[in-house]
Image: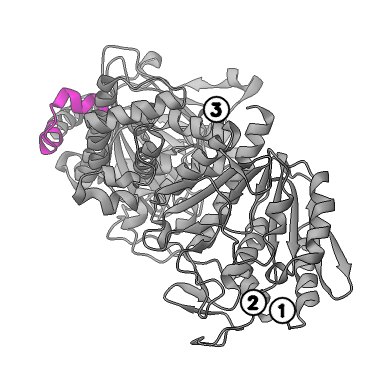
Amino acid sequence: MRSIQMYSSSADLRAGLSRALSLLVLDPEHDEQTPWWMRLPVELRAHGRAGQLGLEQLIELHLQPELGASLDRVRARLDLTPVSAQALRAAARRARISGRAHADHQGRDVYGESNKALWDLAVAPLGEAVERRWGPTCADARCHDARDLPAPDPARAQAEALVRFQTGPSEDGHRDCAEHCAAQLREQGFAVELHRRAESPPVLVAAREPRGLAGRVVLYGHYDTIPANPGWSSDPDVLIERERRWFARGIADNKGPLAARLWALSTLERSPALTWIIQGEEETGSQWSREVLARLIPELEADLWLEETGYHDHVDGTLRLLARTIGPSPDSSLPPDPFSMQLLDGLRVLAASGGLATRAERRGLNKSVVDGGCPFNHALPPGARYLAIGVNDSHAQIHAHDESIPTWTLALHRDELALIFEAIDRLVSGD
Amino acid sequence: MLSPAQRRRYAELGWLVVPGLITRARALELARAFEVQTQRWAEAIDVPPDEYLSVVSQWTNVWERNASFKAQLFDPRAAEIAAELIDCARVRVFHDHLIAKPPLGGGTIPWHRDLPNWPVAEPRALSCWLALDDAPPDAGAMRFMPGGHRLPETSSIDFLNPAEAKQWGPRAAEAVPVPVSAGDAVFHHCLSWHCSPPNATRAWRRAYITIYLDADCTFAPERAAWHPMVRKVHAAPGLPFGDHQFPVLGGKHES
């Protein structure tokens, strides 16, 4: 939504008009659990979701009174003025004429100027508003079906490597796995400290100075797993892909999310200050890490505390936004503050570009099965902004045989991290 | 056909005006053909002609759809001059296009070079800009930067993004408007820097432009993959364009 070029003005306009429609999720009257494309006529939904509607169809949708009114409410929410229906019709007609002339007899306006005029009216202000709030990643996203996204090869290699370490309770791969993670993070410019205690798996604390963005984000994760349960249909310690899912012991809890974030960070040129805490005994009581985190966390001033992973509904991909402000006691959840609410809106907008609905829930990730509870959650200070978002889905079968994650969520999660970083920069900077 | 002075002038400036390439009467015939053809095109897409011409202002490969322009395209005189200026034995038509600036309209075409927008590897090409109407300076006549074709190669400029606009600095004052009369032709090098302002007169400013390449120029789709002609090329990258889609029109007189 940020640029239209003369070399591709028709395609850019179609993409921009599609994306503008996906912003319907910001309409205060829109139910967030309904994907935006469900607002389209039935016969247009599949193409609308995938960003494959034609120019004529998109223009008709923008001119439709109900959708037009909804888009005007979106504009109002983004502090933009409504678009004159008359001006929109006039610009749309010129773009249509140029498009038809080109298709019929290679005639056109001068270098896409009528496409640009419609863009300036219907797309550019929305794109600029999205970029101002949430950054270029959110503004540049194009409409697509997120569930078609392939898993990036480097992320898979990362996940395969992590899965190979035997990190169940009675196994001995913890130190090697921690060293592996440390090496990966050092390669990305992190200063890594391994907090060691005899008989306890090391707690890895990695920190990196800001790279062009303001703010600080603390991420959490763990590299240990539970023992392999009976019933696996493949070797649990070898990652396999089947039906666009990765299967392996610990792939959802928490090696897949770790791999996804290691890969994602390696692709992002800009980030705020980061601290990543990765422990190795979450499944066995977290005794040592509880001590380390109790000392460490009060010293960290983070703008956001990012949980080890998060979930999608496996049926339709709905993104769950588990967000809260930590209350007076560690287990209490207060509503997200305005800062977090704006961040959640950005994540809704990004998810909408992938055709996904969202569902916000004021709670933390369910860790009732974790012995002694989660040390990360318990150590968060009152007022901390907490967000659980990640690559898992409700079909993950954590702690059971055939544990898995969907492969399509990894690329999306990379963009989510980019958006979070860019939005925090804007929020912290007061932009 | 050209005098040594004309060839030197082209080599020095990057453009050459050839007065009366066609007669004024012939130019008016072509202008009339344009009017008839655009009326047909407007009807074909069910748009009133006036509204059509307020939007659509450029047409490509007109020679494939209109006999008058096809006849003009195959007129050997322009091809001979082109071959002489490119200094090659045979020229090939890359494509033609009609550009019309309506009265009191037409917008600004910013400074640009043509070659970076073409999927052509070698800078051995030119455009023949044939005026169908008188084009005085205030009618959107082209402006050129003398010697601009000898400046280092540059990438293409996106007209929709003002940030990419060419800035000449103090050299801006050197720009030369090139007014012409109906029937005159401006041959300009594929690397010449040129632009045109809107048409501020109450008359049309129409031009029929033919792009000539040295027939041995090769297809380089990576340079402008978006160019509409790319779809028409059957030749492999690195080879000359096919004769069927891109006709060879003879060349300079052998002596």
The front one of A61 and B82 is A61
Task: Point out the image quarter for the C terminus of chain A.
Answer: top right
Please state the horizontal and vertical placement of residue A222, each as a whole percent of the image: 69, 65
- C-alpha distance separating marks 2 and 1: 6 Å
Mark 2 or 3, which is nearer the eye? 2
Residue B145: mark in rendering: 3
Marks 2 and 3 close (CB-CB < 8 Å): no
Point out which mark residue A226 bears.
2
The residues tagged by marks 3 and 1 sit, at their Cα atoms, a distance apart of 76 Å
Q: Residue at x 41, y 63 (%)?
A: A314
Q: Position of residue A177 (x, y in %)?
A: 75, 74
* CB contact under 8 Å: marks 2 and 1: yes
- Specify start and end residues of the magenta stretch as a single range: B39-57
Of badges 3 and 1, nearer the viewer stands 1
- SS state under label 1: loop
Structural distance between the alpha carbons of marks 2 and 3: 74 Å
> Which amino acid does the dot numbered 3 rest on?
Met
Against A282, residue B253 (above or below) is above
Q: Which mark is residue A169?
A: 1
User: Which residue is located at x 17 percent, y 32 percent?
Assistant: B38
